[in-house]
Amino acid sequence: MQNDLVLGIDIGGTKTSFGFVNRKGVVQGGTVISTEADNPAEAFVIRLHQHIENTRKKLSPGHRLIGIGIGAPNANYYRGTIEKAVNLNWGESVDLVALFRRHYNLPVSITNDAGAAAIGEMIFGGARGMKHFIVITLGTGLGSGIVANGSLLHGASGFAGELGHVVVDPEGRQCGCGKRGCLETYVSANGIRRTAMILLARQNIVSGLRSLKYSQMTSKRIYEMALAGDAIALETFDRTARILGSKLADAVAHTSPEAIFLAGGLSQAGDLLLEPTRRYLDTFLFRTYRGTVKLLLSEIKTGNGAVMGAAALIWSELASCGENAMT
């Protein structure tokens, strides 16, 4: 039906966004609230439900809400739980799907936020028609969603696809997960800042970055300086691309995708990151895979990507099993 809508919810440690998404990927009535992650999950769902219903009253009459898709850190698709999320003070495990079903007698699905982004790319973005691809989300950290044979890969544990925590250097940078040398400590907004600071300390090169305080050393500022030709900023992006390209080459060896999509705030650096990553990816690829995989930017608008991806979970399930089986 033309008025069918899916509620897409993206839960973060600081903010939670939601919106109502139709079959064409148009987001209606979206808004953002504070997660207040130190409070219990049950209180969060009650408060979020109130905001959802207040927003829903403003939608066009006659719409039908047919499901709820949720993207969240450390989400387990099989169990409907969020488990040991670093930035959510909700304990070892919370059954978020069960909490939502107290308020809605609807299909509810949850998965890792990057996994949701991958489904969004397949349903609404550049991966339409593809059955094998990877989405890399580049923001504060690095997330990933792997699609194989047209389905999001969950693995035996429900947590497959954590490329942000493959190891670049066993003696490398401390990661928030407790390990050292994880990919996201090098390839992320925070990783870029750390790389720039290290280069400034080690190299006696003139750079406008030297006049910035650490709090001002954002990935956006480093990007702006790189565009202006700053040597340290340019080397920062080159080193980041080299590490990313090498680990993407490993991922290709494991999954042989048609394409890899870069999404998230850091992907807005565009060719400054994309072109050297393409070059290094080709350098590190096993020759059998050369020419078989494309490196592309996500076609999902960054501001709506998380909500659209979460909603796409339900649209994807409706498409695979039929609407009657979901209702």
Image (spheres, grey):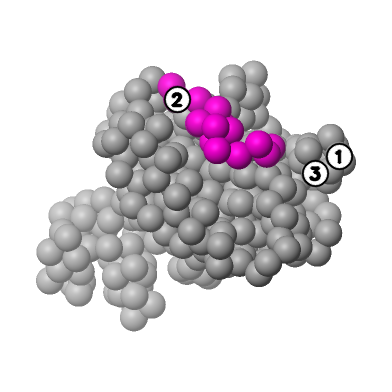
Q: Which residue shows up at 63% across the image and 44% down it? A: 68
Question: What quarter of the picture does the C terminus occupy?
Answer: top right
Q: Is residue 43 visible?
A: yes
Q: Which residue shows up at 17% across the image and 60% down it? A: 215
Q: Tag 1's secondary structure?
A: helix
* Residue marked by disc 2: 94
The Cα atoms of the two marked residues, 2 and 3, are separated by: 26 Å
Q: State which tag comes first along the sequence, 3 or 1.
A: 3
The quarter of the picture where residue 115 lies is top right
The Cα atoms of the two marked residues, 3 and 1, are separated by: 8 Å
Q: Which residue shows up at 39% across the image and 45% down it? A: 47
Mark on residue 318?
3
The Cα atoms of the two marked residues, 2 and 1, are separated by: 29 Å
Q: State which tag comes first along the sequence, 2 or 1.
A: 2
Which of labels 2 and 1 is toward the front?
A: 1
Classed neighbour count for the residue bearing mark 3: other residues with Cα under 10 Å, few (<14), some (14–19), many (≥20): some
* First to last magenta residue range: 93-107
Q: Tag 2's secondary structure?
A: strand
Q: Which residue shows up at 72% across the image and 48% down it? A: 66
Q: Is residue 298 visible?
A: no
The quarter of the picture where residue 106 lies is top right
Classed neighbour count for the residue bearing mark 1: other residues with Cα under 10 Å, few (<14), some (14–19), many (≥20): few
Amino acid type, residue under disc 2 in the picture: Val
Which of labels 3 and 1 is toward the front?
A: 1
Amino acid type, residue under disc 1 in the picture: Asn
* Residue marked by disc 1: 324
Residue 198: where, in percent of width, then height?
22, 51
Residue 314: where, in percent of width, then height?
70, 44
